[in-house]
Structures are given as structure tokens and as C-alpha cells.
Image (spheres, rainbow, N blue to C red):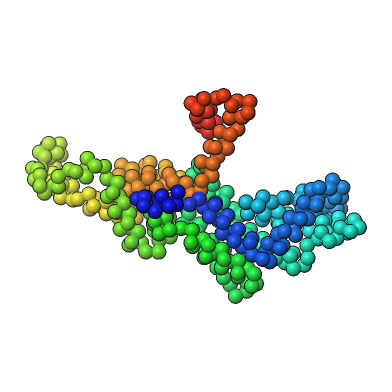
Amino acid sequence: MQKAFEHFPDAWLGCFGHNLNLAVSKILNLKRVESAVRACRHLVQEFSRSWKRRRELKVKQTALQLPVKSLIHDVVTRWGSTFQMLERFLSQQQAISATLAGERGAWHLMPKETDLSVMGQVCELLGPLSQFTDALSTETSVTLSTLKPVLEHIKTEILIQSNDDPPLITQMKKTMREDLDSRYSEKALKMMDIACFIDPRFKGNFSENLVDIVSITVQEALRLVPVNVRQEPPAEMTSRPISTSTLDKASTHGLTGLLKKITATRQQRTEEQSTIEDQVKAEVKIYMCLPSVETEEDPLLWWGGHAGELPHLSRIARRFLCIPATSVPSERIFSASGSIVTPHRARLNPEKVNMLTFLHFNLP
């Protein structure tokens, strides 16, 4: 699919959740981190195989006034589950140690001090990242326009290197930052810039070069102009006379009537002499002058109320703001279809499956 998009006019935009998972997998594959994760995974497996250890763990948790929670086993392909496994182990470390101490020959299951230190550093780095995947996997709100602010926050706040960082955290931040930078092509970054600019919550706040983004947006708006509008002859070639009907409607007595005639004449001449590009640039100026909306508001509702005022820019909003930042919404459809077409309902025809899937996602 990526190879096919190289010669396609539109850009390939990878799933943010998948890209983040690949970047985190790079740091989980580091030798020290991999050793610590393996030790924790082995301990969790041993507890899951023994009901006596699980029962004793609950007793120790109650005695130490810790939350009575089971250990979590990770899924190798999902970094979030690995983070949850490490976090749960560290939070229950005291109860786990007490459980193993009461069993002869089981203390070797406890990870070493160096592994415990590595687990703590990994959780310290991955903790702030755990919320972004779920936040950008929604299908009820705009997500593509938020991708640039999220990536900028990750790179400049979470993955920024500090002099106080231990060597392992510095190495993990560098590895992850380099991997994320390589995941997005120039076309994808351009698409994210346009989507972020056309979102009334952000506008040009996250644009490194606002002049270039405005120019790219104008060109994109001109490309989306309908063919019938684009093929109309220029106003200077038609040389239409100013309509008298407009003036007749504005005709009243006195100075008020004269001002209405002058205003209507000026407005009609301006509309005839302006090109589509001038109209788009004027819309951009109006859009930038309008106040930004709050981050919790829906940008689609905002554009629904300003589509008549900004018709050219609204086409860009319809084209870009509907793009999801992750492939999770489409994968949910496959999961729902898999629950509908079961071995006991394997003779459903495709039309019925489509109808049932549609009802599943659209019935309240």
C-alpha cells in the first residue's frame, strides 16, 4: 500500500496508534529493557499457573492495605499491555515479595534490583504516552487535525532530553524520537498542517511557517473548486453592465437611497473583478480574524455554521477533517462483523451482514 501511494496524488498517512506502537517497540527491544520485561513476564506467568500463589497474594495485599488486584499478563504486539503489566507489578511489588518470601525456592522469580530500576524508568517514560492512543482512536470527534499538536507535545515535552535524565532514559527518548520522525513523509506532514490550520481550535498556532501553510491552503482550495465554477469566463471578458434591478431594489429617497445605490454598485463591481484566488485569500483573512473556539467544541459544528460565509475553505474542512488519525474505527467494523457472522450464522448473505453492521453502529 505504501508503494502504491508513492505515485498517487494523495498522501499515505499511517495509523498513529501503529506508528506509536512501533516506536515504543524499538525501546522495548533494547537489551536492558528487554531483559527486565522478560523477568517480569516470567513472574506473572508463574503466578497465573498457581492458584495457591494467587490466593496468597490476595492475603498479602489485604494485610498490607494494598488494592486487591490481579497481575496483568502483556500481549507482545501491544505496548500498552506491557506498560500495564510493569505498572501493576511495581504497584504490587511489596505484596509479591511477601508472597514469594513465604514459599521455599520461589525467591528466584523476583526480578533483580537492576531490572526493577529499568522497569521504573520505562514506566516513567511510557506513562504520559499511554493516554494518546486511546484519545486519538475515537470515531465521534475530529482526530487528524489534533495529530500535529499531539506529535509536537510528544517530541517537545515528553521526549525532550534533559541533563538530569539517566543514561537509559536518554537512550530511550532518542530512539523513540528518531523512529517517530521517520514515520511521516513530507506529503503526510503537509496534510497534517492543512488539517490543523483549518481547525478553528488551532488555526496557525502550531504552524512553523504560517505564510507557507496559508499558501498551501489557498492552492488546495483552488484545486477543490467545482469544475463548472472554474470554467466560467473571467469577469473582464464578459463586461456585463451593472444590473439595474439591484439598484432599483435599493432605491429610496434622500441620502440613504443614494448610499445604498453606491454600496450596491461597488459591491457588484468588486465581485465581478475579483478572481477565485482573490476570493479564497479574502476568506483566509476573514477566517484568521474570527475568534478561535474552545478545544472541547466540535469544529465540524463550527464549520456547519460558517460554510456560507467561507464556502471555499469549507470544502477543505469537509475533505480533511473527516480523516481519522488511526485505523481503529475501521478495525472496529471488522470486529463487529466478526461478532455478527459466527459459525452458527455463517449463511448470512453480504447484504444482510452490511445491514446488521450498519444497525449495530447507528442504533442508539
Q: Nearer the viewer, residue 266 or 308?
A: 308
**Residue 82, position as x, y percentages in the image:** 67, 54
Considering every residue shown, the one lying at the far front of the view is: 3
Q: Nearer the viewer, residue 208 or 1?
A: 1
**Residue 98, position as x, y percentages in the image:** 86, 58
Q: Does residue 207 appear left or right of residue 50 in this picture?
A: left
Against 49, is 166 above or below? Answer: below
Q: Which of 10 and 307 is in front in this view?
A: 10
| Residue drawn where x is 51% and y is 52% of the image | 16
| Residue drawn where x is 37% and y is 64% of the image | 209
Q: Quadrant of residue 92?
A: bottom right
Visible in this render: residue 286? no
Q: Which of 271 and 191 is in front in this view?
A: 191
| Residue drawn where x is 51% and y is 57% of the image | 150
Q: Does residue 247 appear left or right of residue 25 in this picture?
A: left
Visible in this render: residue 107? yes
**Residue 90, position as x, y percentages in the image:** 74, 59
Q: Does residue 33 appear left or right of residue 7 in this picture?
A: right
| Residue drawn where x is 29% and y is 54% of the image | 219
Considering every residue shown, the one lying at the far bottom of the view is: 163
**Residue 174, position as x, y percentages in the image:** 56, 68
Against 162, is 356 above or below? Answer: above
Q: Quadrant of the C terminus?
A: top right
Q: How many marks?
A: 0
